[in-house]
Image (cartoon, rainbow, N blue to C red):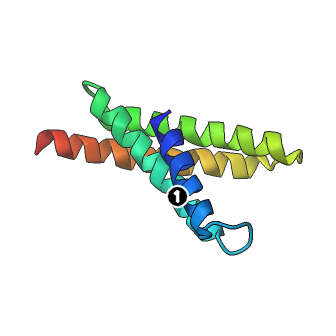
Amino acid sequence: MAGLGTALAAFLVLGATGLADAGSGAAALIFLQYSAQVVAGFLAGRLSAEGRAFHGSMAGMLMAAIGAAIGLGFSGTKASLGLVVIALVVGAIMGSAGGALAQWRADG
């Protein structure tokens, strides 16, 4: 939920400033999504006692799944299963990076 909240807050700021519009702001929105997955993984890693990278990857995958479900629900089109799987794998990688950062922070 923290990752989704971070993404929503950043999206509102980028939208209000005009940096994230439908045409030219796609790169900013993708970067925002990946950053929010790292934040979700970091928070999940910090809150877990052990297996921080695993918990981070699960948080990233959950965030990607929720984002895909919301996006598909509003678009009304059929999605490619391959794209959904890629989104889940990228979410797991980004969340795991956040969990590894939490592990590094806890050790240091």
Image position, residue 5 (x, y; %): 51, 40
Q: Residue furthest left?
A: 108
Q: Which residue is at 71% across, 52% downward?
A: 83
- Quadrant in the picture for residue 50: top left
Q: Is residue 104 toward the left or the right of residue 84 in the image?
A: left
The residue depicted at 74 percent of the width and 66 percent of the height is 22
> Which quarter of the figure is the C terminus placed in?
top left
Taking 34 as reference, is 73 above or below it? above
| Above or below: residue 70 compared with residue 49 | below
Viewer-proximal residue among 20 and 92: 20
Give the structural element (helix, strand or loop) at label 1. Answer: helix
> Does the image show residue 93?
no
Would you name the residue on which mark 1 appears? 32
Image height of 17 relative to 59, above or below: below
Picture coordinates of residue 26, whole percent (x, y): 65, 67
Residue 66's x, y, as percent?
64, 36
Tell me the crowding category of disc 1: few under 14, some 14 to 19, or many 20 or more residues within 10 angstroms, Cα based. Answer: some
- Determine if residue 3 is in view: yes
Quick one: which residue is furthest to the bottom in this view? 24
> Which residue is at 35% across, 37% downward?
43
On the image, the x and y values in percent for residue 81 come to 76, 46
Q: Amino acid at mark 1?
A: Leu
Left or right: 69 with respect to 2?
right
| Quadrant position of residue 102 | top left
Which image quarter: residue 19? bottom right
Q: Would residue 21 be found to the left or right of residue 63 on screen?
A: right
Residue at 50% x, 33% y is 1
Q: Specify the farthest residue to the front.
A: 16
Depth check, front residue: 92 or 68: 68
